[in-house]
Image (cartoon, coloured by chain):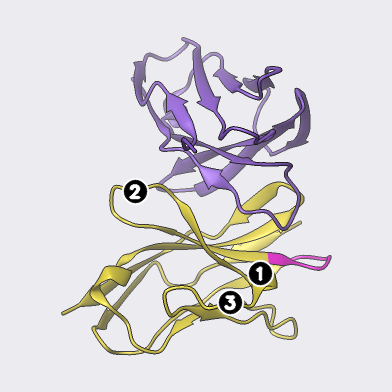
Chain colours: A purple, B yellow
């Protein structure tokens, strides 16, 4: 099976702009979670989608949003970018979510905000 | 609230030496704990989970509810074990990660 894919892999934006990142899960995986990874804060949970519905949400401002399509692909959007949004954004997928399941991670999208 | 603490950011050992990466957690419910590993230029991947009680690549981890710990151990470290290790706590599909420990195994 193909692994989790994320596009684009690298992105440079300026403050105030908005950005959309995409995640394609492993075939058959319906749960997609997003994480932000920074040197100072480590890996932090953004949100999780399952069957096109947001099922879980972390402590991020409303500028961070996401959605999931019927084919389980997911996008996350960050509006009004700030310098502090520079990070590696990871998505992770599982067949159905839940506490016990292994999450399969994508390679990440490296976002730089200038 | 759930919280994971990995007290050591860096850990360096010699090949063949035992290694222990510490992880402590805070969680009000019954925890589901994992160790994830990221080798250089590779994706974050699952190493092991407490519910499986398995040994992967010689690593084991025992959940100690009394001490709220889930330390990762290996009796004889290998150079290929050099990587970033993250302890993670699961609440539903939400993983809470520790800050990670960079393990370096020297020849």
Image quadrant in which you'd find residue A50: top right
| Residue toward you, A61 or B36 | B36
Most frequent secondary structure within the magenta stretch: loop
Q: Position of residue A30 (x, y in %)?
A: 69, 33
Q: CA distance from mark 1 to mark 2?
A: 26 Å
Q: Kindly identify which residue carries mark 1.
A: B25
SS at circle 2:
loop
Q: Position of residue B56 (x, y in %)?
A: 48, 73
Highlighted range, magenta: B27-32
Q: Kindly identify which residue carries mark 2.
A: B42
Q: Position of residue B18 (x, y in %)?
A: 36, 89
Based on the picture, tell me whether residue A49 belongs to the magenta stretch. no
| Residue toward you, B10 or B56 | B56
Please give the chain letter of the residue carrying mark 3: B
Query: Number of callouts in the render?
Result: 3
Q: Kindly identify which residue carries mark 3.
A: B54
Q: Which residue reaches farthest left?
A: B107
Q: How many residues crowd mark 2 within 10 Å: few (<14), some (14–19), many (20+)?
A: few
The residue under the point 43% across, 80% down is B58
């Amino acid at each position: 099976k193909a692994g989790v894919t994320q596009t684009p892999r690298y992105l440079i934006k300026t403050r105030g702009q908005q950005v959309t990142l995409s995640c394609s899960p492993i075939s058959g995986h319906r749960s997609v979670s997003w994480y932000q990874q920074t040197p100072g804060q480590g890996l932090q949970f953004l949100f999780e989608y399952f069957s096109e519905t947001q099922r879980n949400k972390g402590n991020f401002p409303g500028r961070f949003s996401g959605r999931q399509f019927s084919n389980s692909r997911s996008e996350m959007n960050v509006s009004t970018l700030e310098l502090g949004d520079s990070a590696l954004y990871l998505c992770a997928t599982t067949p159905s979510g839940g506490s016990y399941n292994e999450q399969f991670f994508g390679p990440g999208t490296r976002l730089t905000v200038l | 609230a759930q919280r994971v603490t990995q007290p050591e950011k860096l850990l360096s050992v010699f090949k063949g030496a035992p290694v222990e990466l510490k992880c402590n957690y805070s969680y009000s419910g019954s925890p589901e704990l994992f160790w994830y590993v990221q080798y250089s230029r590779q994706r974050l991947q699952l190493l092991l989970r407490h519910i499986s009680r398995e040994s992967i690549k010689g690593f084991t981890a025992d959940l100690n509810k009394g001490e709220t710990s889930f330390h990762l151990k290996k009796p004889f470290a290998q150079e290929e074990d050099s990587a970033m290790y993250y302890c993670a706590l699961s609440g539903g599909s939400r993983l809470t990660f520790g800050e990670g420990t960079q393990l370096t195994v020297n020849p």
